[in-house]
Image (cartoon, grey):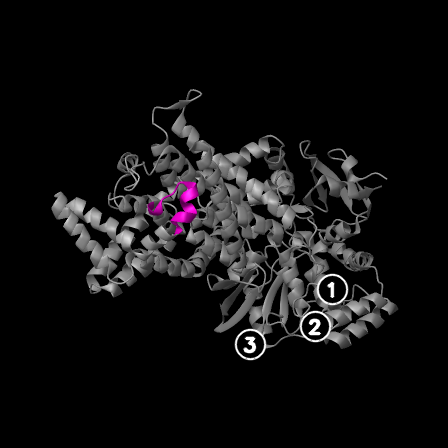
Amino acid sequence: MRTVSQLKPSQSIEITNIKDKSLAVQLFSMGILPGKKIKMIRKNILNRSCIVEVSGTQYALRHYEATQIEIA
Amino acid sequence: MNKNIALAGNPNCGKTTIFNILTGLNQKTGNYPGVTVDKKSGTLSHNNQKVKISDLPGAYSLYPRASDEKVVAEILANSDNSDYPDCIFYIADATQLEKQLLLFSQIVDLKIPIILVLNMIDLLDDSSIDYQQLSKKLGVEIISVSGRTGEGIQNLKNKIVEVYQNIPSAINFSSYKSSAEEQTLLNEVVTLTNAKSDYQAKLIFHHFSWLSFLSTETKEKLAKLKENYPIPDLNAQVDETMSRFDTFGPIANSIEQYKPKNQSEFSNQIDKILTHFILGPLIFFGIMFFVFQSIFTWATIPMDFIDETYGAFMDFSKTIIPEGWFQDLIVDGILAGIGATIIFVPQVAILFFFIGLLEEVGYMARAVYLFDRLMQRFGLNGRSIVALISGSACAIPAIMSARTIPDWKERLITILVTPLMSCTARIPVYVVLIGIAIPIQQEWWGFNAQGMAFGLLYLLGLVSALLLALFFKLVLKSDTSSYLALALPNYQTPSLKNIATQVWNKVSTFVWEAGKIIVVISAILWLLSSYGPGDNMNKAVAEASEMATTQNLSIEEKENLTAALQMEYSYAGYLGKTIEPIIKPLGFDWKIGISLITSFAAREVFVATTATINNLGSEASESSVIELLSLAKDSRTGKPTFDKATSWSLMIFYVFAMQCMATLAIVKRETNSWKWPIVQLVIMSVLAYLSSFLVYNWLS
C-alpha cells in the first residue's frame, strides 16, 4: 500500500486509511481523514518531514506520520 | 446567579482575537488547577451589562492529546466544575468550516446550549454565504463576524448579553448514534457518575484514568465496568469521528461552494524560502539574533532608566521615612525587592512583543516545523529553541515563553534547562573572574584568551542544557505520545492590539505573581546581610573606627572597612563561615561563601558583595575590582584568595548554579508548584558543586 511518504511534490491523491489508530484519532480531528485529497507541498530532505495540504490547510508531518497515511 | 459564558473552538480559529475584542484589558490570566494552561477570563461591558466570559483553551476534539485540550475535556466532562459553561459561543473559521464542526458536534451532544460564531468572514470570496440555510441544517443560531475588520462584533455583543439574561435551550443536532451495546454501558456510567448526558458519560468512561474530579472509588468501579465491556477504545473513537464527519461533512460542503480568497498561494511562495531546509534555519537564526540583540542591548535603555528613577525614588523614600530599622526594612528590604522585579519588565515586554509578532504573523509554526526533529532528540519542542536563545539574554521571559509549548513534558524540560544558558547577569561575574584568572595579553592558539574563555563558558552552558534535557527526557514519564501534525496557518498581517494585550498580560503576571516571591526572598537576604546576632553591628563599627585610627585610614577607607566588617559580623557572614567547610573543597573561603549567599538575589550581586567584603566598597568599578582582588590574600595563610584554580572553579560554579531568585519565582509560577523549582535548584546546585570540585582539583 502506498503512503504519503512516497508522494512527490505537487502530487495530489485521495487518503484511504490511517494505519496507526491512535494517530488516526488525532489526524481526523484536524481534518485529515479518508476520502480527503492530500497534496504533497514540500519535502525536507534533511529531516524527512514534509508539508502537505488537505482541504486548503497545510500541515507539517513527521516522517513517521507520513508513512501511516495510506493513499489510493 | 452568576452564569458562565465560554468561548470554545479549534486552535487558529481566531478565538483569542475575538476574546480580546470583547473584553479589552479587563482580563485575568490564571492557571487551571494542577496544570499550567492559561485560564483566561474577562468581562464584557455592553449596554450597561457586565458579562463574565471565559476563553477555553483551543482544542480539536474532546479526545485530547495536549494539556490544553485535556483541560477542555476535564471541564466539559464535569457538570459540577466551577468553570462548566452554561452556554458556549463556538468560534469557527468560516474558511475551514468542515473540520471545525467536529468539536462543535461533540459539544452539542453534551447538551450544552451553543451559538455558532463564524469568524474570518472577510476572507470569504463572496459574503453571500447562505447563513440561514446553514443555520437551519445544523439547527443552531449563527452569528457571522470578522475579528480582523470588526464586522458583526456588535451583533455578537448583543447576543452575548441576550444569552446571559436568558440562556437558550440546548440544540438537537445528532451526528453520532451509539450502538445498542454501547448504550447499555453508557446507562450504567450515568448511574455511577451522575453524568448529565450520554455523551458526557462516554467522555468520562473514555478518560476516567486521568480525570481529576472522579473519586478513586468511582474510578475503580469504572475500571471494573471496562473489563465487562471490552469496547476497543481507539476503533470506537475512529468510528465516532467518521460518523460525525459523514453527517456534517455534506452540510459544510454545500455551504462551502463559496471558496475562500486564495491566500495560500502567497503563503506558499513565502514558505518556499522560510521552510527551505537550508535557508529556513539561516533566516530563523537571523531573526533570533535580532530578538536576542534587542533583549540584550535595547532593553538596557529602559532598564537603566528604571534603575536610575527607582534609585532616586528609594533615596527619596529615605528622606520621608524616619531613620531606623523600619526605614531599612521598607527601603533596603521591600522596595529593593520590588525594584528587583520591575527591572525585568523591559526584557519580558520586548521578548513577548517579538514572540507575539512571530505567532501572529504565522511564522512560529514554521520555526517549530524546522527544528522539530532536532529538538525532539533532546526531549524538547521546536518552540524550545526560542526559549533557549532568549535564555542567553535572560531566563525569566524565556521560561515564560515556554507556555506556548503544548506538550507538558516538553514544556517542563524547557523550563528546567533554560536557566543553564548563560544569561546577561552572569557577564559581570565572568568579566571579573576571567580578568583575575587570565592575563589580558594571553593568547590561546592565536586568539585572545579572555575572549575564548568567555565563549567557552557560554558553550558549556548550552551543552549542559541540552545534556540535562536528554536526561529529563529519559527520566520523566509522559502520558501523551507526541505527534507533530502541525497546522501551518496562512501568513497574515499581525494585530497589534492582540500583541499589546499579550505583552500586558505577561508583564502583569510576572510583576504580580513572581514579584511576591522576589520581594519575600529579597527581604530575607537583606535581613541576613544587614543584621547580626546580639550587638554585632555596633561592634563592627567600633572595631572599624579603632583600626582606622591606629592605621591612619582616610574617611573612604574607613567607610569601606566598616562595611566589610559589618558584612563579616552579619548573619550572612556567619552563614558564610558556617558553609566554609562545605565549599572549601571548591577552593572557596568564607568571604566567597558570603558572596554566594547574597548573590542568590541575582548573580551580578556577587561582584558588589565581593568588593564590599574585601574593603573595596560596593561601588568599585570592575577593573579596580579585578586589579585589587588579584592581590587579595587570605589573612591566615597568606595565600591569594583568588588564585587561578579558585577563579576557574567559581566561574564554572556560576555557569551551573541557580543563583537567581527571580528565576525560581517564575518557575514556581509557571509549573504551578514548588516541586519543580526545588528539583531544579537541587540539580543545578549539585552540578555546580561537582564541576567546581573537579575543576579546582584539576587546576590546583
Q: Is residue B219 left or right of residue B51?
A: right
Q: Are marks 1 and 3 on the same chain?
A: yes
Residue B587 drawn in magenta:
yes
The dominant secondary structure in magenta is helix
Instruction: Give the chain letter at badge 3.
Output: B
Q: Which numbered disc covers residue B2?
A: 3
Quarter containing the N terminus of chain B:
bottom right
**Nearest the eye: B348 or B685:** B685
Q: Amino acid at mark 2?
A: Ala
Instruction: Give the chain letter at badge 2.
Output: B
Counting from the top left corner in percent of width and height, residue B243 is at: 81, 59
Counting from the top left corner in percent of width and height, residue B445 is at: 44, 20
Q: Secondary structure at mark 3?
A: loop
Instruction: Give the chain letter at badge 1.
Output: B
Residue at the right extreme of this rendering: B180
Q: Is residue B679 left or right of residue B119?
A: left
Using the rendered image of the protein, determine whether residue B602 is visible from the camera's viewpoint. no
**Nearest the eye: B199 or B599:** B599
Q: Which numbered disc covers residue B138?
A: 1
Q: Secondary structure at mark 1?
A: helix
Provide the residue span drawn in magenta.
B579-591
**For the residues bearing labels 3 and 2, Cβ distance under 8 angstroms:** no
Of circles 2 and 1, which is in front? Answer: 2
- Which is nearer the N-term, disc 3 or disc 2? 3
Counting from the top left corner in percent of width and height, residue B505 is at: 47, 57
Residue B78 drawn in magenta:
no
Q: Amino acid at mark 1?
A: Leu
Quarter containing the C terminus of chain B:
top left
Q: Are marks 3 and 2 on the same chain?
A: yes
